[in-house]
Every structure is written in structure tokens, then in C-alpha cells.
Image: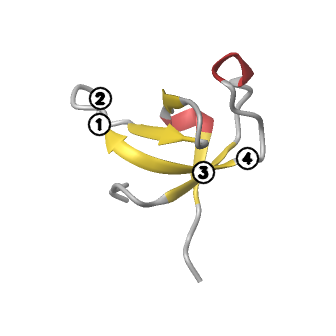
């Protein structure tokens, strides 16, 4: 599963120190070059989410 810019992810870990909360939907705005992790935004904060911190949301 390759995540790309424009995808939506659901936060599943407690990363509130970065402004995200569990259950929040965030948008992928970039891909971190080193780990390939998604850089996500909630409209105010950008943060790199790691594998255990998000779930991919399938578009219906």
C-alpha cells in the first residue's frame, strides 16, 4: 500500500502533543524522504505519522 499526497488518514495513536487526536482525519501533504512516512496536516499543524499511528482510509 503506497500512500501518496492527497490521501486521507485516520489517526489511531495519541499524538496530541502535535495537535492530532485519536479518530481525527488528516490529509497527506508530503512524504518524508528518509522513512517514506506520510507528512500529514489538520489544517494548522504538519506532522510525520509513523506506521502505528494511522490507518489508511479507503475512498468509497
Along the horizontal axis of the image, is 31 left or right of 27?
left
Query: Quick one: SS at disc 2?
Result: loop
Pointer 3 and pointer 2: residues touching (CB < 8 Å)?
Answer: no
Q: Earlier in the sequence, mark 3 or mark 1?
A: 1
Q: Residues within 10 Å of mark 2 (few under 14, many from 20)?
A: few
Question: Which of label 2 and label 4 is nearer to you?
Answer: 4
Residue shown at the point (22%, 31%) measured from the top left: 33
Residue wearing tag 1? 36
Residue 21, x across and y down, in percent: 76, 34
> Which quadrant: the C terminus?
bottom right
Q: Earlier in the sequence, mark 3 or mark 2?
A: 2
Q: Earlier in the sequence, mark 2 or mark 4?
A: 4
Pointer 3 and pointer 4: residues touching (CB < 8 Å)?
Answer: no
C-alpha distance separating marks 2 and 4: 23 Å
C-alpha distance separating marks 1 and 4: 21 Å
Query: Quick one: SS at disc 4?
Result: loop
C-alpha distance separating marks 3 and 1: 15 Å
The part of the image, by quadrant, that contains residue 45 is: top right
Q: Earlier in the sequence, mark 1 or mark 4?
A: 4
Q: Report how many numbered discs are placed on residues in the image.
A: 4
Residue shown at the point (60%, 35%) measured from the top left: 53
- In the image shown, does 51 or 28 lie closer to the viewer? 28
Q: Earlier in the sequence, mark 3 or mark 4?
A: 4
Label ID, residue 55? 3
Along the horizontal axis of the image, is 27 left or right of 55?
left
C-alpha distance separating marks 3 and 2: 17 Å
- In the image shown, does 10 or 19 lie closer to the viewer? 19
Question: Which of label 3 and label 4 is nearer to you?
Answer: 4
Residue wearing tag 2? 35
Residue wearing tag 4? 24
Amino acid at each position: 500500500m503506497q500512500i501518496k499526497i492527497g490521501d486521507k488518514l485516520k489517526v489511531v495513536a495519541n499524538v496530541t502533543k502535535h495537535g492530532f487526536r485519536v479518530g481525527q482525519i488528516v490529509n497527506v501533504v508530503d512524504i518524508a524522504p528518509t522513512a517514506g512516512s506520510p507528512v500529514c496536516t489538520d489544517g494548522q499543524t504538519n506532522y510525520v505519522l509513523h506506521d502505528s499511528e494511522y490507518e489508511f482510509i479507503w475512498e468509497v
